[in-house]
């Protein structure tokens, strides 16, 4: 008689694929927040001044996500921050031009004052 064959060692089942995503790019959330602050602050010019920064951070996050997709997943926050930054920057430039136009008209009015009525 032959000796019984020992059973083959059982290997554990492979780990199930992970469903967790890589963390979003670190600049995506600040771009979104700054874009929202800049657009919401369009009534007051100072918060609107952060819109170009939101534009820069959103563009950088998108560019790095495209360059390294295995490290940074595509995230809507970066795109939203980019778009809000662009819109806020356009509003900022428009308000600046309007303010400069008003100041220019006021300076023309002051220089053209003929002194009638004095």
Image (tube, rainbow, N blue to C red):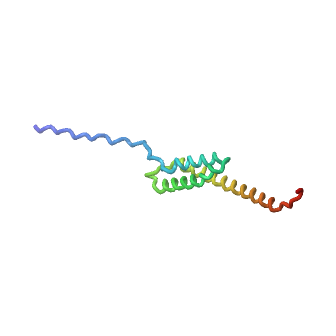
Q: 94 or 118, which lies in front?
A: 118
- Residue at x 59%, y 55% (from the top left corner): 52
Left or right for 45, reference 114: left
Q: Position of residue 93 (x, y in %)?
A: 67, 56
The furthest residue to the right: 117
Q: 9 or 35, which lies in front?
A: 35
Left or right for 108, reference 77: right
- Residue at x 52%, y 47% (from the top left corner): 29
Q: Position of residue 86 (x, y in %)?
A: 61, 53
Q: Position of residue 114 (x, y in %)?
A: 86, 61
Q: 50 or 5, which lies in front?
A: 50
Q: 77 or 91, which lies in front?
A: 91
Q: Residue 101: name its quadrant.
A: bottom right
- Which quarter of the image is occupied by the C terminus? bottom right
Q: Residue 108: name its quadrant.
A: bottom right
The furthest residue to the left: 1
Left or right for 101, reference 60: right
Q: How many marks?
A: 0
- Residue at x 60%, y 46% (from the top left corner): 37
Q: Position of residue 110 (x, y in %)?
A: 80, 59
The correct choice, above or below, for 38 with respect to 6 in the image is below
The furthest residue to the front: 118
- Which quarter of the image is occupied by the N terminus? top left
- Residue at x 46%, y 53% (from the top left corner): 69
């Amino acid at each position: 008689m032959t000796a019984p064959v020992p059973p083959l060692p059982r290997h554990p089942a492979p780990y199930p694929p992970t469903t967790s995503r890589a963390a979003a790019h670190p600049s995506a959330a600040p771009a979104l927040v700054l874009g929202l602050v800049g657009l919401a602050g369009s009534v007051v010019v100072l918060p609107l001044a952060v819109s170009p920064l939101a534009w820069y951070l959103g563009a950088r996050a998108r560019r790095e996500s495209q360059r390294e997709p295995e490290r940074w997943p595509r995230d809507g926050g970066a795109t939203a921050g980019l778009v809000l930054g662009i819109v806020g920057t356009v509003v900022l430039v428009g308000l600046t031009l309007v303010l400069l136009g008003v100041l220019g008209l006021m300076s023309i009015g002051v220089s053209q004052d003929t002194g009638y009525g004095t």
